[in-house]
Amino acid sequence: MHRKITRRLSPAMVIAVVALFVALGGTSLAAAKLLPDSVGSPQVINGSLQTVDLSTKAKKALKGNTGPQGAPGAAGQTGATGAQGAPGAAGQTGAVGPAGATGPQGAPGPQGTPGTQGAPGAAGTARAYGRVSPTGALSRSKNVATVTSAGAGTFCITLDGIDPTQTVLVATPDYQNDSTGVGANALQAYAEWHSTPCANGGLRVVTGYRSQSSASWFGSPAFVQTVSLTQANQSFSFIVP
């Protein structure tokens, strides 16, 4: 059998309960005014909000003006040398430089040792030859019978054992006893084979000299004025191939 227990609240208990309801009711009213659009300072723990929790307007308000540029920092330490790069492409060939100055002449080389004398050459194949003076004297000859004079600057050579009609003769002046000289307007000797034989059938050689004169008018360069040939006895040599 249940027994109903009735107990009366004391005045202190009543006051405490009323105060609790008043306190709870005030907090609820404050929360009702702030939520859900905003959060008041009492609901925020100091230092707990992050930048992402702020609105764009609030972020802009927090950003201040750019301050002055600071002083340059100290230079950093030199870094390690990097790896060598690949060789570049070859450049174009440059222009040829000017020729250098001529170097000093080198010392003479040592003198070489004299060579050995060669063997005598084979005998010549000329059938006849000789030297004739202005007077017709013959020397240094081979296979020549006689040399006679047939007038000024004309010599007749008779060969020994050679048919004059089947051969030729080559003549050249001998500087030793001819009229050739050196210098301006000097004489120049000549000696030529004449293919017409002499009356005695000998080979004919004609000799002489060439002369010239030059002049200059009113300071102009010298020029040849006259040239002439004179037939006269001259020293010469000859060969019959």
Image (tube, helix red, strand yellow):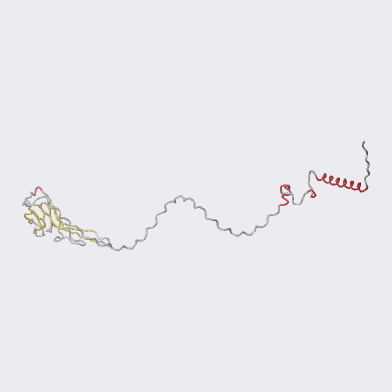
| Of the pair 213 and 177, the residue shown nearer to us | 177
Q: Position of residue 234 (x, y in %)?
A: 12, 58
The quadrant in which residue 223 appears is: bottom left
Question: Quadrant location of the N terminus?
Answer: top right
- Does residue 39 appear left or right of residue 173 in this picture? right
| In the image: residue 61, left or right of residue 220 | right
Whole-percent x, y for residue 16 in the image? 89, 48
Return the residue nearer the eye: 110 or 56. 110
Q: Nearer the viewer, residue 71 or 154?
A: 71
Quarter occupied by residue 132? bottom left
- Depth check, front residue: 216 or 120: 120
Image coordinates of residue 46 in percent, x first then y, are 76, 51
Q: How many marks on residues?
A: 0
Which residue, as the protein is rendered here, is positioned at the far front?
1
Residue furthest out toward the top: 1
